[in-house]
Image (tube, helix red, strand yellow):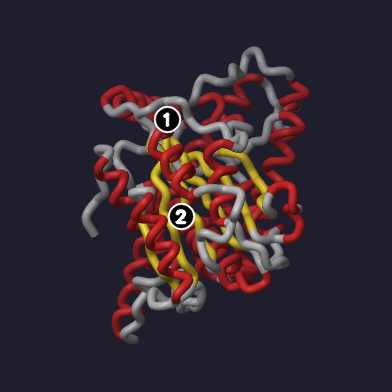
Amino acid sequence: MQSRTAKSVLVLFVLLVSAVAVAEEPEETIDVVIALDTSNSMKGLINVARLKLWEIVYDLSLMEPTPSLRVALLTYGNSKGGAETGWVSVETDFTEDLDLVSERLFELTSDGAVEYLGRVLQTALDGGLHWTPSEAALKLIFVAGNEPADQDEQVDLGDVSDLARREGVSIHLIYCGVTEHEDAQSWKDFAEMAQGGFAAINPRIGAAVPTTPFDNELAKLSAAINETFLPMGDEGRKRRENLTQQDRNAETAGPAAVAGRARVKSSSMYVAPWDLVEALDAGEADLYEIEESELPEALRAMSFGEREAYIDEMRLERATLRQRIVKLGEERRQFVARQIESKGIDNSRAFDTVVRQAIREKAKKNGFRFPER
């Protein structure tokens, strides 16, 4: 067993290496809006978005330099939005809290029949979302749905495309159906006008993911890494509870969602400023100054030295679990890829495939790099 001194030296070394890496390659921000048609016909799209969120996010974690990701979730075509908003709802403004995005996704229901593409884009661009002000940030909107793109009589798509270009926002349209459908043409025409992207998908593709020999172990590791988070204050405790709740939600979506979520929790994409370990490492908290009432209950009865040792233990345990998740997650990915290839499954029209490809294409143009697989 390592001594506490040896553990502390190792922790210091890891932090120094991380600091050097950050200094050499400063992080950039990626703002991603996901706008989903949640009308009556889009239940399949909602389910796939729940399933594939974590795979999309994990793909972003592979980028170099590592970006800071903020996600906003909007819905349209649902009766809950109301006529005054064009049946558009902002489920969450831009946030780094991926558990919040997952929570909102699992709260969605399909209901309604008026899908105004122009209105949801106008809301995303000029409706109160807090975009990153930096011109260097990568800004993307993904809209998925069906019905004609130009049926909103109150919003001119030309004005929307002009606004997007002025704000440096790239629009990517995902039509749920076949390219040959007459409604798809209006989506293609608008994508060309906006100098954005277009893809036609089958929302059901990618929903059936094979189980693998790695699923149970990844689920266990995902639960184990939760125990290394030390929530600060009431807000931290609420966020820690939601972490567990989103694990349960992932379970309802299936083993693939659990595995994808585990991989995200092992990456830099999972941001938890409410966690004492992360706050200390980021310089956002000082163990000498933090109020005892804000400390996790497990630490309150400890001496200062015992608290430091316990935090070091959690930090090292988390690093170990992350390494195991990364290894098993890659083995699982390769296993699934072989299964898909052997069965001749074409995932090119899957929701997550077109989103990941579009992000990669834009990110590479902005100077980001992806490892070769």
Query: Which residue is identified by label 1?
Result: 11
Q: CA distance from mark 2 to mark 1?
A: 22 Å
Q: Is residue 231 above or below residue 224?
A: above
Asked if residue 265 shows in the view, the reply is: yes
Looking at marks 2 and 1 on the same chain, the residue that comes earlier in the sequence is marked by 1
Q: Is residue 183 left or right of residue 249?
A: left
* Label 1: how many Cα within 10 Å (few below 14, some 14–19, many 20+): some
Q: Horizontal and vertical percent for residue 270?
A: 51, 43
Q: Horizontal and vertical percent for residue 52?
A: 50, 62
Q: Residue at x 38, y 28 (%)?
A: 135
Q: Is residue 208 left or right of residue 82?
A: left
**Which residue is the extreme one toward the bottom?**
343
Q: Residue at x 28, y 38 (%)?
A: 366
Q: Is residue 77 above or below residue 4?
A: below
Q: Quadrant of residue 255?
A: bottom right
Q: Marks 2 and 1: which is nearer the front?
A: 2
In-front residue for pair 246/124: 124
